[in-house]
Image: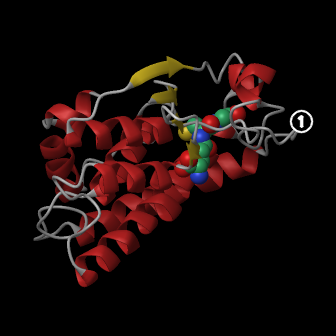
Amino acid sequence: MKLYDSTMAPNPRRVRVFMAEKGVDCENIQVDIIKGENLDESFLSINPRGLLPTLVLDDGTVIDETVAICRYIEETHPEPPLLGSDAISKAHIEARQRHMEFDGLLAAADAFRNSFPGFSSRGLAGNAGSVDAIPALAERGKNAMLRFYESLDTALNGSAFIAGETFSIADITALCTIDFAAGAARVPIPDHCSNVQRWHAEVSARPSAEA
Ligand SMILES: N[C@@H](CCC(=O)N[C@@H](CS)C(=O)NCC(=O)O)C(=O)O
């Protein structure tokens, strides 16, 4: 299988880290989002939405959407389970993973997308046409990201991982969100969020974080 990927973007990294945790390897094809390669006809013919990550199986089946790709990998490579192992843990991990996405990743994306000069007319990701960035959304995204850090700090007080005592996809989403926020969006973990700092140091030390 082939992963259409971009090392500069957080969603494809979620899939790379997920695969690394599972010990799954596949062909990697880099698509440069800043240069707009994701909007070239050659990529749109594979994924008309123009978004990464996109996985293409050996029989030509195309799977897009980070979590859908991760679900496919989980089904085909069940160990170690990263999406939960029983009804309660599956539900809880799914909820926490969505919290990381909606409260964190979307905020960081708003902060970056609406302040990065190269995206001034690419206010929406992918094949959405010419859409102006909105500078006020960058400010709102930064503030939302700071609120996200505060609430994560409270949640991690006494909890090893994002969804409890087991490493899961929720940790992967949070890691990729925070590294993207700290780097591209320039909203690092505040010094006083010591639980987030502790958790971040631990998950960053896992070999999969190199992915
Ligand atoms: N919900 C989608 C979001 C995918 C997405 O927004 N990917 C970004 C990279 S992180 C992208 O492809 N951006 C292309 C662009 O900015 O034009 C998923 O999780 O796969």
Question: Residue at the location (58% across, 46% down)?
Answer: 64
Residue 89: x, y in percent?
24, 76
Judged left or right of residue 66, residue 113 is right
Residue 152: x, y in percent?
31, 64
Judged left or right of residue 179, residue 135 is right
Judged left or right of residue 136, residue 77 is left
**Which image quarter has ligand 1?**
top right
> Where is residue 91, by image quadrant?
bottom left
Question: Residue at the location (18% across, 57% down)?
Answer: 167
Above or below 120: residue 168? below
Furthest residue to the front? 59
The answer to which of 53 and 196 lies nearer the viewer is 53
Above or below 98: residue 210? above
The answer to which of 92 and 176 lies nearer the viewer is 92
The quarter of the image holding the C terminus is top left
> Where is residue 112, by image quadrant?
top right
Q: Amino acid at mark 1?
A: Ser
Disc tally is: 1
- Inspect this view and state whether residue 188 appears: no
Residue 127: x, y in percent?
79, 38
Report which residue position mark 1 lands on: 130
Question: Residue at the location (13% across, 35% down)?
Answer: 205
- Inspect this view and state whether residue 158 appears: yes
